[in-house]
Image (cartoon, rainbow, N blue to C red):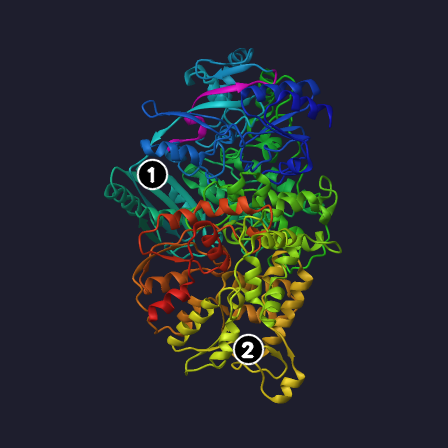
Amino acid sequence: MTDLEAALRRAVRGEVGFDTTSRALTTMDASNYRRVPLGVVAPRDADDVAAVLEVCREHGVPVVARGGGTSIAGQATGTGVVLDFTRHMNRLVGIDPQARTAVVQPGLVLDRLQDAAAPHGLRFGPDPSTHSRCTLGGMIGNNSCGSHSVAWGTTADSVRELSVLTARGRRLRLGQDWAGAPEGLRELADGELARLRTGFPDLPRRISGYALDALLPERGADVARSFCGSEGTLGVLTEAVVGLVESPRARALAVLGYADEAGAAEAAAGLLPLGPLTVEGMAVDLVPSTEGLPRGGAWLFVETGGDTEAEARTRAEAVVRAADVVDALVVTDPGGQRTLWRIREDASGTATRMPDGSEAWPGWEDCAVPPARLGGYLRDFRRLLTAHELRGTPYGHFGDGCIHVRIDFDLLSADGVARFRRFSEELADVVVAHGGSLSGEHGDGQARAELLPRMYGAETVALFERAKAVWDPDDLLNPGMLVRPAPLDANLRFSVLPLEPVDVEFGYPSDGGDFSAAVRRCVGVAKCRTTSVPGAGVMCPSYRATGEEAHSTRGRARLLHEMLAGELVTDGWRSTEVRDALDLCLSCKGCRSDCPVEVDMATYKAEFLHHHYAGRRRPAAHYAMGWLPVWLRWAARTRTAPVVNALASVRPLAAVAKRLGGIAGEREVPRLAGETFSRWWRRRGGRPTGGGDLVVLWPDTFTEHLSPSVGRAAVRVLEAAGLRVALPPTLRGGAVVGDGTSRSALALLTARRGQVCCGLTYVSTGQLDRARAVMRRTLDLMAPVLETSAPVVVLEPSCAAALRTDLPELLHDDPRAARLAARVLTFAEALERHAPDWTPPQVNLPAVGQTHCHQHAVLGDAADRRLRESAGLAGELSGGCCGLAGNFGFEAGHYEVSAACAEEQLLPAVREAPDGAVVLADGFSCRTQLEQLAGVWGRHLAEVLAEGLE
């Protein structure tokens, strides 16, 4: 233990982390930069903060304050001690509805303040797109804005008082009329009044530099306002009094379509006199699908408010009439507005990929110019991109003249980094020529501080340095930011990654087969750190259960990044830090769809486990549950299912078996079916009947051995819909589709028997060699099916997802894998596509349950929704993850997290269900979790429809 660590542990009541994991999780924010800290402290209160500052001052170690870690310019990284306010100093101290103020701690997430203010008809005005995870402290440090700044301004406009600790331990209460000013600040300002009055551009989004002009007497000598945007370089915030604004009772959203972004930009300023709440712009490049949007190549999102829906709509329609648009849409339904706003908010992540899939990066993320000059600025910006052979898609706060953009800089090569510098210098001059600010929302950090002399001139920048010396004479707080900055092309986070592709098992088709590129997908916007999942979303259940950064998708990606870098995590694939962080990953695949850049942590986890345990003994659960298909087939062939069930019912024997198998003691072992699904199929005749389309029904492990009633129900419904149902062949060589065996007696003698399997359990435990062998055997068996046009209907969503994604990505060298993946349909998709005229039975009951996480992430549930509606099953299924997640919830040590995930949405939805409601759960894991935690047995949609046929 170092002297610094020991001193901090003696002085601080909060957590002190100098271990590899704690440091690795905070090497980066959402910028291009990386710094390795000495350690991380999670202070419990202001006294802890004071103690940290005292210890670090004695040791000459810098201190960096960090909130949600979503800063775009690098200001939330540092080489000293990082203060993490999100763990303890995250409370809403109080709200005064009459005064319209709130008292908050720096680690409070913005959405929590909004939730508390809403019952009083109030809200905090600024709302960045990261509102579900950014903190008030970070917003004050960066002077954040968000989409409603045209109505309610920046964070500085909402700050009333700030409680601050200086690096030398002084406790100040900052406010107007020089309240809380450190010694020497007033004298500094009084001596530079002319410069403060003339040297700062008058812009709604001037975030760059220190806001020293707020100290002018005619502006109230507001020390708190001047502190906003100082990026943790002047003092450490411990509490804030912020103002709230009245939230409109009703809102309408006018989406205005334009031919291109220049047209949208030039129109934005003209809409401001109409008093909109937002004027946001984005182009078609950032929209995965234009469904639901009006015609056009770019759009303005203009929100209006009113006391009633009619009043809000009237104002929105006035905006449409005043705008010269290609097409327009006015939405007053709150759900419809949320859907549209999510398109805009996800642009911060979507923009990290170009339309062709190549990478794009921040760096010139949020320049701002006068709104009336935005169109001209965008044209000059585009010309500069072309001159440097770069690409980027602007979007952002058009009404404030603030533009966000990610650019496809090559930050991996020396030539690319040199181009990044040249472009940055030239663009800074373009921004200044248009009367703009280098930063319009996210701060200067390392990305732009070096260029501040181009905007302010050398004398004003020297004034910034003098102001820093007044507040922090020892340069202890976040050095290298704003004044005496590090070069904009130093400390790039990509420079430590291997230049050559890492040898891996999966194909990573979206990343050119490069695992490093896959890990680089995580840019740190931290949508995975939301504390409540919106709508049908899933990501990230383990983070919401534990609240630990290491258990978020971003945290795991950061550890993988450091593993590849080899500087902090030094043992590569053998890393215990990475293994432990991935241990609580449920492999729910939620990040694959919910992460704006489609980080696929389930695949990364399987990849890591494969390498981590290569040549070594694995945990017992990997053998017990990873090889589950083998054990279940063995029980079926020996007809010992009744014996297994009897032994499992004897508690002492079951306890011993669970301990040996690495299974959680709290779990009950599921009962094996007395008759497998395929045995029932053969007893029934084993051949398709009817004259409709042929469909091949996949006998997944769970349906085959544990839930054959689902398979029987599916056969009945599919046949009732006029389809001919067959099972896959079980013999390789001479097999035909439809009889499950072979063409002739000779084939019976020469063919090898087998059973199809998607390989899911082997993939989820990282046994990729075994998974590959199982998948190749399956492709051999399915060869006759692939010669037909028959779809493959998979009842278990996790198995369908494995066939759709894991199969072609793991067997990327076998063209049959992609062909089979393309044939996979869900139960609802098969009925919709191959029996479009069939009318399902009218169940006419309310339905509750949860959309399977793999279905949400990979398969989609649109067909299921339509089928439920057609059958009269009313109600929306919840989002999230059931928490059992295949083998995850059965593994020893996972029970508490598994149950916590279920308690988030699934179990409350079932408990609150109306009488007679159908509990839907298409996944065996979901049904098992419901049975074991709630005493409720959910049913597959096929079972409900089959019962309706009666």
Determine which of the numbered discs, if any, sits on residue 618 in the image.
none
Q: Position of residue 707 (x, y in %)?
A: 49, 65
Above or below residue 592? Residue 270 is above
Image quadrant in which the N terminus is located: top right
Q: Position of residue 564 (x, y in %)?
A: 70, 47
Q: Amino acid at mark 2?
A: Val
Is residue 153 in the magenta section?
A: yes
* Disc 2 target residue: 785
Q: Amino acid at mark 1?
A: Pro
- Which residue is at 45% across, 53% downward? 930
Q: Earlier in the sequence, mark 1 or mark 2?
A: 1
Q: For this rendering, which residue is in front, 306 or 60?
A: 60
Compute the Cα span from label 1 to label 2: 58 Å
- Which residue is at 60% across, 67% downward? 635
Q: Left or right: where does residue 220 sit relative to residue 41?
A: left
Q: Position of residue 199 (x, y in %)?
A: 51, 23
Q: Which residues are magenta?
A: 152-168
Say which element carries label 2: helix
Q: Left or right: where does residue 83 sit relative to residue 726?
A: right
- Which residue is at 37% across, 51% downward? 257
Q: For this rendering, which residue is in front, 260 or 523?
A: 523
Image quadrant in which the C terminus is located: bottom left
Q: Left or right: where does residue 759 sit relative to residue 163?
A: right
Q: Position of residue 38 (x, y in %)?
A: 69, 30
Q: Is residue 197 visible?
A: no
Determine which of the numbered discs, if any, sits on residue 276 in the image.
1
